[in-house]
Amino acid sequence: MRNNLMSNAIESQLDSIFRTQLHSFFQNCSRDQWKAIILNTLCNVGQQFGFQVFSSKNLCPQADCDAWIYDQHWRLVNQYNPLVRLPLVMQIETIQDENVLLQERITQSVLKLAQSRADVRLLVLECSNAEKTMHYIYNILEQFENSQAGDRYVFALWDFDIPWNSNSMQVLFHHK
């Protein structure tokens, strides 16, 4: 796949960020702060890689531009083209309580990521029963006929069925 070294570096950073760096934030802050913490942390990473970052300016003031299509995306640009490549697109679904619309929201986020031609697609998700949720997500992705060799997904999941004080972020990789 084109940009494989950069994609590997991005995935490695995401794994480290969600398993270690953000873990303490998730245990010590309220859920309504999660999205801002995630957006700001990943905005800094994207900018360190040299990409323009598009994210909600209300939640992530240091973003280069406001969100466009995704909760956040990183964009490679040059002097001739405002969109050379999308190194990362991200959707975040944080659910305050178990919500009957959770499956619909997950579906919409997965479909949005599936249609993207980004190098790495990231879904950050609070869910009930992570194993069942991932089975549902993988089924959607396997049914998508436009999947291509080299498609890369990262799933960072917080299972709210696990007691808060013993929980940790699960980071899963799905490559076509």
Image: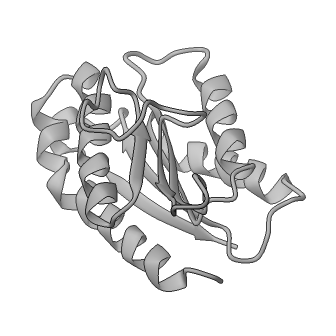
**Residue 122 vertical placement versus 97 (above, below):** below
Classify 23 as above or below 127: below
Quadrant of the image for the N terminus? Answer: bottom right
Q: In this view, does 141 lie to the left or right of 102?
A: right
Q: Residue at x 76, y 48 (%)?
A: 140
Left or right of 89 on screen, residue 43: left
Does residue 115 lie above or below 129 as drawn? below
Q: Is residue 168 visible?
A: no
Q: Residue 89: x, y in percent?
A: 53, 50
Which color scheme is applied? one colour
Q: Which of the 4 quarters of the picture holds residue 20?
A: bottom left
Residue 94: x %, y % from top left: 41, 27
Whole-percent x, y for residue 126 in the image: 41, 34
Question: Going 18% across and 44% down the picture, which residue do you hit?
Answer: 166
Question: Residue 6 occupies which quadrant of the picture?
Answer: bottom left
Q: Which of 71 and 153 is in front in this view?
A: 71
User: Observer-nearest residue: 137 or 79?
Assistant: 79
Please tell me which residue lies in front, 175 or 78. 78
In the rendered image, the quadrant that contains the C terminus is: bottom right
Q: What residue sits 34% from the left and 64% below the top?
A: 50
